[in-house]
Image (spheres, rainbow, N blue to C red):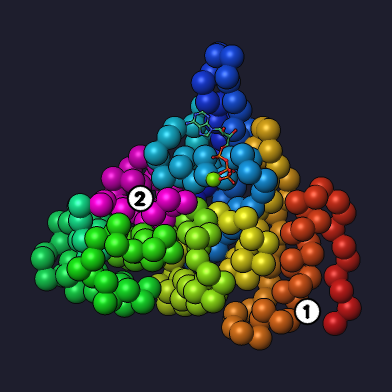
């Protein structure tokens, strides 16, 4: 079964008005179970719009969005995915702990289950000591890590992430990239991940979807075959080849031939 399938998806905002925008035009994209797919492209090309369509936060103007074999709306009701978006989107009046517990509350988990799972997730993102704090008492990067913990709390089969590491320092970012890959590998979670960073997209993904702006389209899909990731991956020739391929695709230039081994 596929995790996500978009078929002929078009999204027009403000249709028929002077400020009409075609954010996405005839997008076809399939994400397999356990696959990690990144979206990359210039600002305004429709990456967040695509993710919001998958999350059923907005509806397509044309085409169909299927998540875990169901219409997007049903998948949302069934909590088939967790989301971590550009803004952390935490509730100011809830502690860190209770923010992470929220999706478990919606699912009707018991109090002790909620507590334990939230603790486990906060430990994972290195914030166990801040469970009793409120979001306003945390830095932007820490808030973002709480949002990631919350997205993971129900162990969803699919994660939708919109520049989740954008506000983090480089070392934390690399650590969380590795954590995310470890979690995905051990749970079989599929991910659709938006980023502006070419190295991040290449490091994380099985495939990098390159998009162009106005109207947002997929111009190229770059497969990445780096095997198991680790510290050495970031220095490997294959990693740099992947970066070059994605950079060329973003510029609209020819893809270079494979570098000799
Ligand atoms: N709710 C909305 N109403 C009207 N236009 C919108 C709305 N949301 C997005 N758009 C427009 O759709 C286009 C795509 O926006 P989107 O946020 O998906 O881009 P993006 O690729 O995520 O950009 P960035 O990299 O800057 O986050 C933009 O032209 C934007 O102005
Ligand atoms: Mg965006």
Residue 27 showing in the rendered view:
no
The secondary structure type at the circle numbered 2 is loop
Residue 29 lies left or right of residue 145; in this view the side is right
Decide: is 139 above or below 162.
Answer: below
Instruction: Please say whether residue 223 is one of the residues in the magenta stretch.
Output: no
Is disc 1 placed on a helix, strand or loop?
helix
x 46%, y 76%: residue: 179
| Residue that numbered label 1 is attached to | 237
Locate residue 209 relative to residue 7 in the image: left or right: right
Badge 1, how many Cα within 10 Å: few under 14, some, many 20+? some
Q: Quadrant of residue 187?
A: bottom left
Quadrant hosting residue 27: top right
Residue ranking furthest to the front: 137
Which of disc 2 and disc 1 is earlier in sequence? 2
The image shows residue 107 at horizontal and vertical percentages of: 20, 55
Looking at the rendered structure, which numbered label has been put on residue 89? 2
- The residue located at (52%, 56%) in the rendering is 163
Q: Is residue 88 above or below residue 54?
A: below
Residue 137: give x, y in percent of width and height: 29, 62
Which quadrant contains ligand 2? top right
Question: Is residue 131 visible in the rendered structure shown here?
Answer: yes
Q: Which mark is residue 167?
A: none
Q: Quadrant of residue 223?
A: bottom right
Residue toward you, 139 or 233: 139
Report the front residue among 88 and 56.
Answer: 88
Tell me where the magenta segment starts and ends, as one range.
66-92
Residue 260 is left or right of residue 100, and the answer is right
Q: Is residue 21 above or below residue 163?
A: above
Which residue is located at x 20 percent, y 56 percent?
A: 94
């Amino acid at each position: 079964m596929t995790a996500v399938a978009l078929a002929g998806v078009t999204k027009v905002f403000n249709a028929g008005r002077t400020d009409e925008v075609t954010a996405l035009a005839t997008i076809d994209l399939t994400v397999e179970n356990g696959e990690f797919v990144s979206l990359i492209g210039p600002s305004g090309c429709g990456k967040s719009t695509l993710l919001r369509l998958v999350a059923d936060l907005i509806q397509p103007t044309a085409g169909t969005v299927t998540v875990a074999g169901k219409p997007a709306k049903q998948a949302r009701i069934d909590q088939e995915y967790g989301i971590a978006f550009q803004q952390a989107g935490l509730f100011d009046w809830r502690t860190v702990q209770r923010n992470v517990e929220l999706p478990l509350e919606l699912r009707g988990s018991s109090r002790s289950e909620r507590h334990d799972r939230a603790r486990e997730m906060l430990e994972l993102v290195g914030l166990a000591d801040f469970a009793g704090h409120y979001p306003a008492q945390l830095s932007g990067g820490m808030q973002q890590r709480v949002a990631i913990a919350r997205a993971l709390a129900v162990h969803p089969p699919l994660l939708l992430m919109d520049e989740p590491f954008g506000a983090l320092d480089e070392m934390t970012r690399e650590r969380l990239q590795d954590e995310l890959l470890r979690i995905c590998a051990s749970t079989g979670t599929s991910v659709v991940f938006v980023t502006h960073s070419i190295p991040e997209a290449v490091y994380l993904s099985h495939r990098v979807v390159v998009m162009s702006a106005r109207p947002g389209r997929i111009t190229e899909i770059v497969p990445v075959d780096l095997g198991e990731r680790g510290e050495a991956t970031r220095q490997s020739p294959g990693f740099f080849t992947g970066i070059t391929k994605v950079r060329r695709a973003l510029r609209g230039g020819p893809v270079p031939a494979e570098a000799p081994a």
